[in-house]
Amino acid sequence: MQPFSYARVKEEEAAVQAAAQPQTMFLAGGTTLLDLMKLNVLTPSHVIDINALPLSTIEMLPDGGIRVGALARNSDMAYHEGIRRAYPMLSEALLQGASGQIRNMATAGGNILQRTRCPYFRDASTACNKRDPGSGCSAMDGINRMHAILGVSSKCIAAHPSDMCVPLAALDAVVHTRGPQGARAIPFAGLHLLPGNHPERETSLLPGELITSIDIPPLPFAARSHYVKVRDRASYAFALASAAVALDIQGGTIRGARVALGGVGTKPWRSLEAERVLVGKTAGDAAYQEAANAALHGARPHRQNAFKVELAKRCIVRALTVVGAMS
């Protein structure tokens, strides 16, 4: 681990000002940052501890939505009665992520910004365009079983690791920030960037910008939602493929749908194609399979992860089947 300075702040403005220094990173739960610093993948010169900021509340909004403070712990979100009732797929995704100990430390803002678990990104001795732009991508011809099949580029095929971000993508969450240029509200779909030719640019956050909260807008039919995750073992494993879905079914016809995927995209993957297929169809196996096919239509698998195409489709069908059977 490289030497660095450490400061603990108690006010948002102080955090933003401190982060104006080059090579500065915020410390919240630390479940990603500390690991990567130990591996010399991240080498900040300054670390700003923001845990004393008053950003850990979870509150109901007047419009029926929920605001989650950036420092709210994943375990608090998972067991929050409002989230469990209004957005069960979010609670389910959180409870299927990491371990109980890590959920007690990990924060909402940190989860959104967690870095890929690509082993080549985490190994500073290998080529990785995300870690060292222009060096190449070892995963292309290496071990790529866990890698992405949607949103990939010739520069990077690293999968986004978050479970929590999958339902947030489906729910049209909004991320609120504060930075040197003031406050911003960023639609979730615009926060994470596709790798393209610049995989080192992972989000649309500006230098020194601090996430303060995440708003989840009201979506009445999200009470009928479900998260399905397929992984190599029953706990403490990242998704090979996952799906977060919600359905609005009236008289047997699908009037609204939300579909998002995890484990297969370079960013949390909202499938508008699947949603368009579902709306207006009779709820049932035929519609669910058609939606799954639409969601994976543009998949670009590599040598070891072609199985993810069918696996992701089955996750979607399974999740839709469970939700469709809810009374």
Image (tube, rainbow, N blue to C red):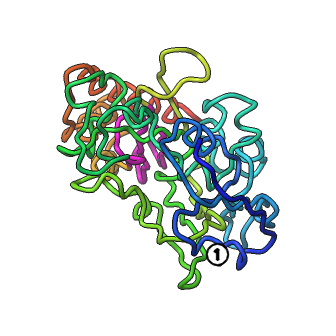
- Percent x, y for residue 82? 75, 52
| Label 1 sits on residue | 16
Q: Is residue 267 magenta?
A: yes
Is residue 224 at least partly visible in the picture?
no
Q: Quadrant of the C terminus?
A: top right
Residue sitting at 49 percent across and 60 percent down? Answer: 172
Report crowding for label 1: few under 14, some 14 to 19, many 20 or more residues within 10 A (C-alpha).
many
Q: Residue 202's image quarter?
A: bottom left
Residues rendered magenta in the picture: 242-269
Q: Residue 315's image quarter?
A: top left
| Residue 173 shown left or right of residue 133 in the figure | right
Comparing 45 with 316, the one in front is: 45
Above/below status of 50 relative to 310: below
Residue placed furthest toward the front: 3
Residue sitting at 63 percent across and 38 percent down? Answer: 94
Residue sitting at 79 percent across and 61 percent down? Answer: 57
The amino acid sitting under disc 1 is Val
Residue sitting at 19 percent across and 35 percent down? Answer: 300
| Residue 141 shown left or right of residue 244 in the figure | left
Q: Residue 46's image quarter?
A: bottom right
- Percent x, y for residue 64? 68, 66
Is residue 141 at least partly visible in the picture?
yes
